[in-house]
Image (spheres, coloured by chain):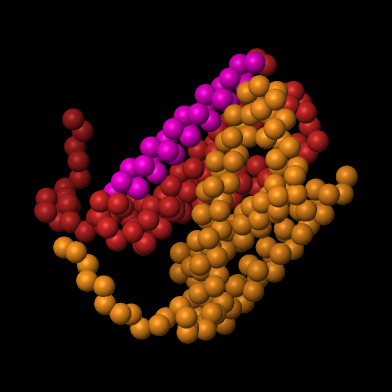
Amino acid sequence: MHEQPAKYQSALGRVRGLGTAHHGTHHWWMQRVSSVALVPLGLWLLYSLIHLKGYTKEMIVDWLAHPLRIVLMVATVWTGLYHSLLGLQVIAEDYMHNRTTRTVLMVGLRITFFLTACTTLIILIKILGHHA
Amino acid sequence: MKPVHRPLSPHLQIYRPQITSVLSIMHRTTGMALAVGQFMLVLWLVSLVASPEWFECYQRFWQHPLGIVILMGLSFSFFYHLMNGLRHLLWDSGRGFDLPTVYKTGYGVIGVTAIATIVTWINIFID
């Protein structure tokens, strides 16, 4: 096991003060990282969707079934879903005061977003596989 | 412990809306709209591997006037959330907290959002 730098924080200190997200500043930081990533990705998505105007289903699948575009689409959808999840968590924390309701919502949101992310991945793999 | 419901002083009913508060709640609102929009996007991806009938049906919804209005709302939300998001990142870097700058960047966000949305839709409608 590799050596860890000396930590002067007590166990209790580590556990406390992590906030309702239970991960300290991680949530805040990931919100910023995902937002920066989404600037180019979101613009790419918008540009692409406009470009696809008037395309038939076959033409769209043809256009999409290239490794680079598939990767960009996965990246955009996943980052977008992640960023949305973080944002919706904050909204839930702000407006739901009942702890049980809030917890149920948080878990429900996570599950929904996870399933959506899985669905997206499988679909995009399928599209790529069609036209290998 | 059950919360006791005590009367609150009026706040939202009487406080004058300002560029600070309005742009802030708009950021949250557009964020929620975009979250819903993403599921629409994933549904679109699903329609690409589903039956042709399904794809046609989904496609037709977005070509219907109601669908177009929703898309306009989503594109507006996208540009707004993007521009105000950049404004947030500016704040995160520690800059622009003085009131004149808050107002300037605020108007900038509104202006760029309006222009970008209009240009995008002119682009879409003109072949």
Chain shown in red? A
The answer to whether residue A8 is left or right of residue A31 is: left
Who is closer to the viewer here, B15 or B5?
B5
Chain shown in orange? B
Viewport quadrant of the N terminus of chain A = top left
One can see residue A36 in this view: no
The answer to whether residue A92 is left or right of residue B33 is: left
A13 above or below A59?
below
Count every numbered label the image shows and give the total: 0
The answer to whether residue A116 is left or right of residue B108 is: left
**Residue at horizontal 42 percent and vertical 50 percent from the top:** A86
Who is closer to the viewer here, B91 or A128?
A128
Viewport quadrant of the C terminus of chain A = top right
Q: Position of residue B111 (x, y in %)?
A: 69, 69
**Residue at horizontal 68 percent and vertical 63 percent from the top:** B113
Q: Position of residue B21 (x, y in %)?
A: 50, 74
Q: Quadrant of residue A47?
A: top right
In this view, the residue farthest toward the right is: B127
**Residue at horizontal 33 percent and vertical 43 percent from the top:** A107
Report if residue B73 lies within the magenta region: no
Q: Quadrant of residue B102?
A: bottom right
B5 above or below A20?
below
Q: Position of residue A98 (x, y in %)?
A: 27, 58
The answer to whether residue B39 is left or right of residue A47 is: left
One can see residue B112 in this view: yes
Who is closer to the viewer here, B69 or A58?
B69
Q: Position of residue B1 (x, y in %)?
A: 16, 63
**Residue at horizontal 81 percent and vertical 36 percent from the top:** A54
Report if residue A110 lies within the magenta region: yes
| Helix, strand or loop: magenta stretch | helix
Region rendered in magenta: A103-130
